[in-house]
Image (cartoon, rainbow, N blue to C red):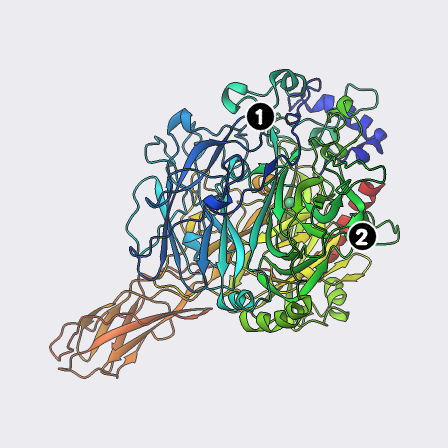
């Protein structure tokens, strides 16, 4: 959701109506239209600081580098054990800036240096060797632990919790391994966070925080995680995911790399197929607080005392509406966002816009790579492997490589270098070999030549005005494993890593597009024209300086030949085979057969609208129809609605995710690697996945007005312990209204305790969207845990076996099987979920033990330990109790099947929206 000025301008009559009606609403405080709310970083020189590399040897001129975490290999034999703390610290990120206050992870192993390093420590893991982490929140307690960024307490999870009058603290933090096949207890998601041990709060940790069962209790202020690493090699990253604070915590610095390697990938290195020289390029956008004069002119409401002065991280904090009911044209020139009170029909707002407000997206003005603004990197004329991660909060990147303007002497003999890219002189090609899921089945050749952003201008097309031409397009959290061969670059040359992705994508607000010579937009709440050689500039991300003796050319043919075999060896085969993209997909979206490659299709929705305070937001959902706060019939569910996505282990699902809105989103699937099958527009045109979307991904782009098909086959990792299931209220911020198993009712029982099984989430990774409700739980269902040894009581020729129900794996236990030793007897309660089973037909005066297994819809768990031995005798009392008792069955609502009517309704709803927005 962008600022949509183009749309607002096209509907003045609607605006007038909205203004008229607004007077009668009287629900919300009119916003102050006169105060600007933006700012721009101090003017920084480009390419004066070098790129931080790995380890102390990679330190740049400012002393920045990304340390590699030091494992403790003895405390937990067979595992690499890391101790990581969270601290506030400062680091200088550019020569023209003072040190910036940051909040991030520190390797607290005594063998490490005891210092914080931005984006560190990088964990390097090996396939099938577990990593264990003890994460300690070492922030200050009380007000001193507050985040030094504007926190909006109207965002779910950032304000009041279940204790009346008591807010959650701002020093909450967790640790999520993004991309990891991790047991849910260690996934570090929204409700798995901790506060410092010294914090005085009713909410010292998230309700779903569970430590690793076979590690010592880490005590208050700490949590433990277990990462099995049973995946192929890939670049992942670990970052904060705390409810209501993720976007700000990550922006403040809570993100670090996690590089998983595997033997097949290492074999490619050993064999010289891919370069051994490997360089991370972690790209973010930041805005730094400028000098007080500029700050006062652009963001007079910035709270310097609490959020910091010049050089501190800046973040937007006012919801500045596009609409101004007092203006003749109804528009606010400084506005950024549509305000729901002023649209038609208006949002039934539940309150005024808060003074400190979340905004849907935060697009900053300064690119930072590995923690340095506008870095340069000296490279030799040879091939390198770059591990690229878009770690921006909300900004997409369309990465290209060009020679720099004037990198050689111009015809007039003058050697100019203004730090610009010469868009007529392509740099070397990118051989993309991997994405989030590891190596791809084939090399994707990019930058051959570079492709600048291009819009689909075919008005007959279902993707009219979408960005359909791009180079290496990476949304937030997407990764690319690329080889660039500089061997043919003349020594002495300079190259520019260039980006021209619009922000938002695709409907750009030009005030977020900073480049040399950009129009002066100060009258509209934007930046002045950028000077050559200086920031702000989000196009010229970094510079490569090539020098030295050229190496032999990189053997791309050998790479192309080798990659498919390695993929086949290390990666699961595709669920939907290549070549099936044709007939099935469109047929599946509008009617029978509702299957793809024989797999039933589940329809999911992605809907943009407004929150209850009138702010633009987006939500995920299924085909459940809801009426939003404008009275529109729509789709989409809040995070706190009962779960709708169930993932039985070992099954295969195809999701058709229909996008009703105008923003591109990156949807991230925890637990899952997904196969991008294809995309289909509303005219029926089919778009195969991009060459770099083949193989497996977990962060996937969803473009406007496309139904995107993904296929998943969830499976649990193998663990050395069992884990409980996630049982919590739907809404952790309010008291529960009903016991586990009670029936959800939006009025009478809106917040029952609910079994989420192995709880994960799927959510937008534009962090501004994720934070304001673009997240839904997924219930991963596995076999029940192993029951404890049952108790047994002997009777006359029988025994009564009593079972304690184990965790049900997220799917109700349907029956217990009791096995006697020695064999014999008849279980009178066989095939039932009763927890008391009477075994008859036993032989008196023979000693028996009993074991038990639990079964649910997913399968049967492990066999329990035996009961104590009992001996039926003719004189044993009574007839024994039969069946009944004790059993509590949790009935989980099944997921609604795919509905052709549902999708047709979705399309009917979406088409008028689309017409309106594209007028
Ligand atoms: Cu989004």
The residue depicted at 57 percent of the width and 47 percent of the height is 775
Ligand 1 near label 1 (Cβ, under 8 Å)? no
Mark 2: which secondary structure? loop
Disc tally is: 2
Q: Locate the N terminus by quadrant.
A: top right
Residue 454 can be seen in this image: yes
Residue matched to label 2: 463
Q: Earlier in the sequence, mark 2 or mark 1?
A: 1
Residue matched to label 1: 356
Horizontal and vertical percent for residue 836?
29, 67
Q: Is residue 347 above or below residue 847?
A: above
Q: Is residue 311 above or below residue 711?
A: above
Horizontal and vertical percent for residue 802?
26, 67
Label 2 and label 1: CA atoms lie apart by: 36 Å
Task: State the image quarter where residue 351 is shown.
Answer: top right
Ligand 1 near label 2 (Cβ, under 8 Å)? no
Task: State the image quarter where residue 902 is shown.
Answer: bottom right
Q: Nearer the viewer, residue 762 or 646?
A: 762
Q: Is residue 759 above or below residue 365?
A: below
Q: Nearer the viewer, residue 518 or 620?
A: 518
Sort mark 1 into few (<14), some (14-19) or many (20+) by Cα contacts within 10 Å: some
Residue 911 can be seen in this image: no
Sort mark 2 into few (<14), some (14-19) or many (20+) by Cα contacts within 10 Å: many
Q: State ligand 1's quadrant.
A: top right
Would you say 508 lies left or right of 307 here? Answer: right
């Amino acid at each position: 959701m962008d600022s949509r000025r183009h749309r607002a301008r096209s509907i003045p009559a609607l605006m007038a109506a909205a203004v008229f009606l607004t007077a009668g609403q009287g629900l919300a405080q009119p916003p102050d239209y006169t105060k600007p709310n933006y700012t721009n970083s101090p003017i920084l020189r480009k390419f004066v600081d070098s790129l931080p590399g790995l380890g102390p040897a990679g330190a740049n001129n400012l002393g920045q580098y990304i340390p590699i975490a030091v494992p403790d290999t003895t405390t937990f034999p067979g595992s690499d054990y890391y101790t990581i703390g969270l601290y506030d610290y400062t680091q200088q990120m550019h020569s023209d800036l003072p040190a910036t206050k940051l909040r991030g992870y520190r390797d607290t192993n005594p063998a490490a240096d005891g210092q914080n390093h931005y984006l560190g420590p990088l964990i390097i893991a090996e396939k099938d060797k577990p990593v264990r982490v003890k994460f300690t929140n070492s922030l200050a307690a009380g007000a001193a632990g507050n985040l030094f960024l504007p926190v909006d307490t109207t965002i779910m999870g950032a304000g009041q919790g279940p204790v009346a009058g008591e807010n959650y603290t701002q020093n909450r933090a967790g640790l999520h391994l993004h991309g990891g096949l991790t047991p849910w207890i260690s996934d570090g998601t929204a409700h798995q966070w901790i506060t410092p041990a010294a914090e005085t709060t009713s909410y010292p940790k998230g309700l779903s925080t569970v430590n690793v069962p076979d590690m010592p209790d880490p005590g208050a202020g700490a949590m433990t995680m277990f990462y099995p690493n049973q995946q192929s090699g890939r670049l992942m990253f670990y970052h904060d995911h705390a409810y209501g604070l993720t976007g700000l915590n990550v922006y403040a610095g809570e993100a670090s790399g996690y590089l998983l390697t595997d033997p097949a990938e290492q074999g490619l290195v050993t064999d010289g197929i891919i370069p051994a020289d490997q360089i991370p390029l972690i790209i973010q956008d930041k805005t730094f607080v400028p000098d007080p004069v500029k700050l006062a002119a652009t963001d007079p409401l910035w709270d310097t005392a609490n959020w910091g002065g010049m050089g501190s991280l800046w973040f937007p904090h006012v919801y500045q509406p596009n609409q101004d009911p007092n203006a003749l044209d109804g528009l606010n020139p400084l506005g950024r966002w549509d305000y729901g009170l002023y649209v038609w029909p208006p949002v039934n707002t539940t309150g005024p816009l808060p003074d400190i407000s979340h905004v849907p997206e935060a697009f900053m003005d300064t690119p930072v790579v590995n923690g340095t603004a506008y870095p340069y990197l000296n490279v030799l004329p040879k091939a390198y492997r770059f591990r690229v991660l878009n770690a921006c909060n909300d900004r997409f990147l369309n990465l290209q490589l060009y020679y720099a303007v004037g990198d050689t002497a111009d015809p007039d003999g003058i050697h100019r270098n203004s730090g610009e890219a010469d868009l007529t002189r392509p740099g070397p090609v990118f051989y993309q070999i991997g994405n989030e899921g590891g190596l791809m089945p084939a090399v994707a050749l990019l930058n051959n030549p570079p492709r600048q952003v291009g819009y689909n201008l075919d008005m007959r097309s279902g993707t009219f005005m979408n960005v359909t031409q791009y180079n290496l397009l990476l949304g937030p959290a997407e990764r690319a494993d690329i080889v660039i061969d500089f061997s043919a670059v003349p020594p002495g040359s300079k190259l520019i890593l260039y980006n021209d992705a619009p922000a938002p994508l695709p409907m750009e607000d030009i005030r977020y597009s900073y480049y040399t010579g950009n129009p002066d937009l100060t009258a509209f709440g934007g930046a002045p024209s950028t000077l050559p050689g200086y920031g702000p500039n989000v196009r010229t991300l970094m510079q490569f300086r090539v020098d030295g003796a050229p190496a032999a050319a990189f053997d791309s043919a050998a790479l192309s030949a080798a990659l498919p075999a390695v993929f086949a060896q290390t990666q699961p085969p595709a669920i939907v085979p290549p070549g099936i993209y044709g007939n099935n997909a469109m047929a599946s979206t509008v009617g029978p057969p509702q299957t793809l490659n024989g797999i039933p299709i589940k329809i999911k929705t992605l809907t943009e609208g407004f929150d209850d305070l009138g702010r633009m937001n987006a939500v995920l959902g299924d085909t459940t129809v809801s009426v939003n706060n404008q009275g529109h019939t729509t789709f989409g569910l809040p995070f706190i609605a009962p779960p709708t996505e169930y993932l039985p282990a070992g099954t295969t699902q195809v999701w058709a995710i229909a996008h009703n809105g105008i923003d591109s989103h990156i949807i991230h699937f925890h637990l899952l690697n997904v196969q991008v099958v294809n995309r289909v527009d509303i005219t029926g045109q089919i778009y195969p996945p991009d060459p770099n979307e083949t193989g497996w991904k977990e962060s996937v782009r969803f473009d406007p007005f496309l139904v995107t098909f993904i296929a998943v086959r969830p499976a649990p990792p193998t663990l050395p312990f069992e884990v409980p299931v996630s049982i919590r209220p739907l809404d952790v911020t309010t008291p529960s209204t009903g016991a586990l198993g009670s029936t959800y009712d939006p009025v009478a029982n809106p917040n029952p305790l609910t079994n989420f099984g192995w709880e994960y989430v799927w959510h937008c990774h534009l962090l501004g969207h994720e934070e304001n409700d673009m997240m839904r739980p997924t219930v991963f269902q596995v076999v029940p845990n192993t029951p404890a040894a049952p108790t047994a009581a002997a009777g006359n020729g029988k025994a009564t076996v009593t079972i304690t129900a184990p965790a049900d794996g997220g799917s109700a236990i349907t029956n217990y099987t009791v096995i006697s030793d020695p064999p014999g007897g008849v279980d009178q309660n066989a095939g039932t979920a009763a927890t008391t089973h009477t075994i008859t037909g036993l032989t008196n005066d023979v000693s028996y033990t009993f074991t038990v297994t639990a079964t649910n819809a997913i399968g049967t768990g492990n066999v329990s330990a035996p009961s104590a031995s009992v001996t039926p005798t003719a004189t044993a009392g009574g007839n024994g109790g039969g069946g009944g008792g004790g059993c509590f069955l949790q009935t989980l609502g099944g997921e609604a099947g795919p509905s052709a009517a549902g999708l047709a309704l979705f399309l009917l709803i979406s088409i008028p929206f689309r017409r309106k927005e594209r007028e």
